[in-house]
Amino acid sequence: MKYYNQEDFPDSIEYQCPPKEAKQFQGKIYRFSKKVNNKTDSKDWISDSKIKNAYNKWSSVNNYELMCQSSGYSCFLSEKQAKTAFNEMTKKNKALKKKFKSLYYVAVNKTDGVLLDTTNPKKEYEHFTFWMSCKSDIATHHFQVTKLQA
């Protein structure tokens, strides 16, 4: 299977990306958006690997795990998980409240990609990474967003 952002996967024989443990998933994934009372657009599907600053740092020290995660898409498996993560993340990084205003969910099927639990045990919330198949068209759909904050 070919994936979006595959050109940013770690170039190593020691590490497979997506990891072997990643499984096909069918269900809803929840993601943050910069939109308010609107719909998502292609900008909501830019991976961290395209932002480059952190990716270049991980690449320079051969941190294959973070390089691989940055080529996927952060997500959560429920609205509650997403809101808990948002609240925990914004305690330490207030700028995230300005960056992300809402969340949305996408119903994915097994041909859309693979999912892996990438929760950091040092964090107080769950986190997942989704690697999207090049055959998937979910990034081109416009999904309704739900306001994160009152």
Image (cartoon, rainbow, N blue to C red):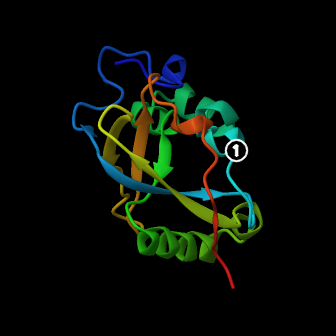
Q: Quadrant of residue 99?
A: bottom right
Q: Residue furthest bottom?
A: 150
Q: Quadrant of residue 76?
A: bottom left
Q: Which quarter of the image is occupied by the N terminus? A: top left
The residue lying at 54 percent from left, 27 percent from top is 59
Q: Residues within 10 Å of mark 1 (few under 14, many from 20)?
A: some
The residue lying at 47 percent from left, 75 percent from top is 84
The answer to whether any part of residue 124 appears in the image is: no
Horizontal and vertical percent position of residue 148: 63, 74
Q: Secondary structure at mark 1?
A: loop
From the viewer's side, name the closer residue of 28 and 67. Answer: 28
Is 17 above or below relative to 72? above
Horizontal and vertical percent position of residue 79: 46, 70
Q: Quadrant of residue 96?
A: bottom right
The residue lying at 41 percent from left, 30 percent from top is 64
Horizontal and vertical percent position of residue 87: 56, 77
Tell me the residue that label 1 is attached to: 41
Q: Which quarter of the image is occupied by the C terminus? A: bottom right
The answer to whether any part of residue 97 appears in the image is: yes
Horizontal and vertical percent position of residue 139: 57, 37
Q: Amino acid at mark 1?
A: Asp
**Would residue 22 be found to the left or right of residue 31 on screen?**
left
From the viewer's side, name the closer residue of 143 and 70. Answer: 143
From the viewer's side, name the closer residue of 28 and 128. Answer: 28
**Would residue 93 be found to the left or right of residue 133 on screen?**
right
**Would residue 117 be found to the left or right of residue 54 on screen?**
left
